[in-house]
Amino acid sequence: QVQLVESGGGLVQPGGTLRLACSASGVDISRDAMGWHRQLPGKERQWVASVFGSDSTRFYGDSVKGRFTLSRDNAKNTMYLQMNGLKPEDTGVYYCKTVLRGQEYWGQGTQVTVSS
């Protein structure tokens, strides 16, 4: 059974940093496709960043490129999203996702609020 649990969200001032974590079970994050998505207020869920299998290449959406970094700790089976230079428009619920044998799995999400 696949389970994804996000943590690390919170309230931060503009320009601040947060690190989100996605603790996974039932999936091998070092091998399977993993990603971060977010849902901004009043908008549809959007893709943020991904890593595919054992390939170390990361992919980022244009709005977060250069500010966010996706990483993995294979020993902990946990994926992270380091978010620097946060902006008010980054406010939303952040989700991790994996696709296993054609089935999508999502975490419950963690709220990120960027406000002064």
Image (tube, rainbow, N blue to C red):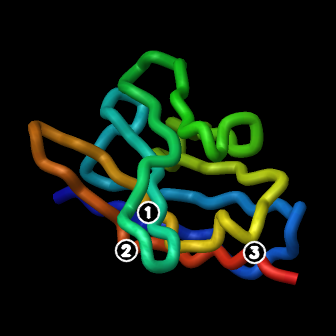
* Residue underneath mark 1: 95
Residue placed farthest to the left in the image?
102
Alpha carbon separation for disc pair 2 and 3: 20 Å
Of pointers 2 and 3, the one earlier in the residue sequence: 2
* Residue underneath mark 3: 114
Question: SS of the residue at dot 2?
Answer: loop
> x, y (%) of residue 12?
81, 75
Q: Which mark is residue 108?
A: 2
Alpha carbon separation for disc pair 2 and 1: 7 Å
Question: SS of the residue at dot 3?
Answer: strand
* Residue 23 visible at all: no
Judge left or right: residue 82 versus residue 79.
right
The one of 1 and 67 positioned closer to us in this rendering: 67
> x, y (%) of residue 96?
42, 56
Within-10-Å neighbours for mark 3: few <14, some 14–19, many 20+ = some
Task: Give the label, 3 or 1, closer to the camera.
Answer: 3
Alpha carbon separation for disc pair 3 and 1: 17 Å
> x, y (%) of residue 54?
41, 19
Judge left or right: residue 60 versus residue 105.
right
Question: SS of the residue at dot 1?
Answer: strand
Residue at point 50%, 78% (across, down): 41
Quick check: marks 2 and 1 in contact, CB under 8 Å?
Answer: yes
Q: Quadrant of the C terminus?
A: bottom right
Q: Amino acid at mark 3?
A: Val
> x, y (%) of residue 108?
37, 74
Residue at point 89%, 61% (across, down): 15
Q: Amino acid at mark 1?
A: Tyr
Within-10-Å neighbours for mark 1: few <14, some 14–19, many 20+ = many
